């Protein structure tokens, strides 16, 4: 996982610094509003650790994102909610982890003027986790945690004002559970966005 973070962050840094020619274009429209849905998969100790709150399972992720930009760089901001399985982490049966947060960052397009445009991105996020019944955290609502994310995907024009945007995002955020336990969320989200373009 660290290697994946390093490669994507390096790519974003090179693009942002101007090391890639400035003729690289944006994702086709200056304003996109996306609804996203997909799978959220825990990684590292969040998936297989035995600490407080660790041992989460895969679940559903969804969100809304707005992308704005007219050049090869585009800023984005969004809201998301991820629902991880929580049985192995000690939650009562049927109770998931619910990680809710906002994110913001920059996307950098790797092509221009095409029907399919690859992009990479990097950003910051804040997350609050609800984990009812986890041992040593009976109240179940964490402090607001902060972290970062890297992403890569495609922007695929599907019509005059419609586009599809499949993407893979990897994130790392730390938060404090009630009772003082530190929870490190490391996860990947593979999802599909349906974008209205303006």
Image (cartoon, rainbow, N blue to C red):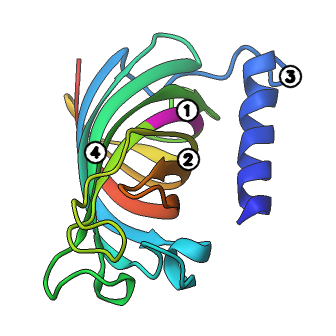
Q: Residue at x 60, y 35 (%)?
A: 122
Q: How far apart are labels 4 and 2 at the CA level?
A: 15 Å
Residue 101 image offset from top left, x and y in percent = 32, 40
Rendered view: 97 above or below 169 = below
Helix, strand or loop for the magenta stretch, by majority:
strand
Q: How far apart are labels 4 and 1 at the CA level?
A: 14 Å
Q: Which residue is mark 1?
A: 123
Q: Nearer the viewer, residue 164 or 131?
A: 131
Q: Nearer the viewer, residue 122 or 32?
A: 122
Residue 184 image offset from top left, x and y in percent = 55, 59
Label 4 CA crowd tier, 10 Å (few <14, some 14–19, many 20+)? some
Name the front one of labels 3 and 1: 1
| Upstream in sequence: badge 4 or badge 2 | 4
Q: How far apart are labels 3 and 1 at the CA level?
A: 19 Å
Q: Which residue is mark 4?
A: 80
Rendered view: 29 above or below 6 = above
Name the front one of labels 1 and 2: 1
Q: Is residue 1 left or right of residue 123?
A: right
Q: Which residue is mark 3?
A: 19
Q: Which residue is mark 2?
A: 151
Quarter assignment of residue 135: bottom left
Name the front one of labels 3 and 2: 2
């Amino acid at each position: 996982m660290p290697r994946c973070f390093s490669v994507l962050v390096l790519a974003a840094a090179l693009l942002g610094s101007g090391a890639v020619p400035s003729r690289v274009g944006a994702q086709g429209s200056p304003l996109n509003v996306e609804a996203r849905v997909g799978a959220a998969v825990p990684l590292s100790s969040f998936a297989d650790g035995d600490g407080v709150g660790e041992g989460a399972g895969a679940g559903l992720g969804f969100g809304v994102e707005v992308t704005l930009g007219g050049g090869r760089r585009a800023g984005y901001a969004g809201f998301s909610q991820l629902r991880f399985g929580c049985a192995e982490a000690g939650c009562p049966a049927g109770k998931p982890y619910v990680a809710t947060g906002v994110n913001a960052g920059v996307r950098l397009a790797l092509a221009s003027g095409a029907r399919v445009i690859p992009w990479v991105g990097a950003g910051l996020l804040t997350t609050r986790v609800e984990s009812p019944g986890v041992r040593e955290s009976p109240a179940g609502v964490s402090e607001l945690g902060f972290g970062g994310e890297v992403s890569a995907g495609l922007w695929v024009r599907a019509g005059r004002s419609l586009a599809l945007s499949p993407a893979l995002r990897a994130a790392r955020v730390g938060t404090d559970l009630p009772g003082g336990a530190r929870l490190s969320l490391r996860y990947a989200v593979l999802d599909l966005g349906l974008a209205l373009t303006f």
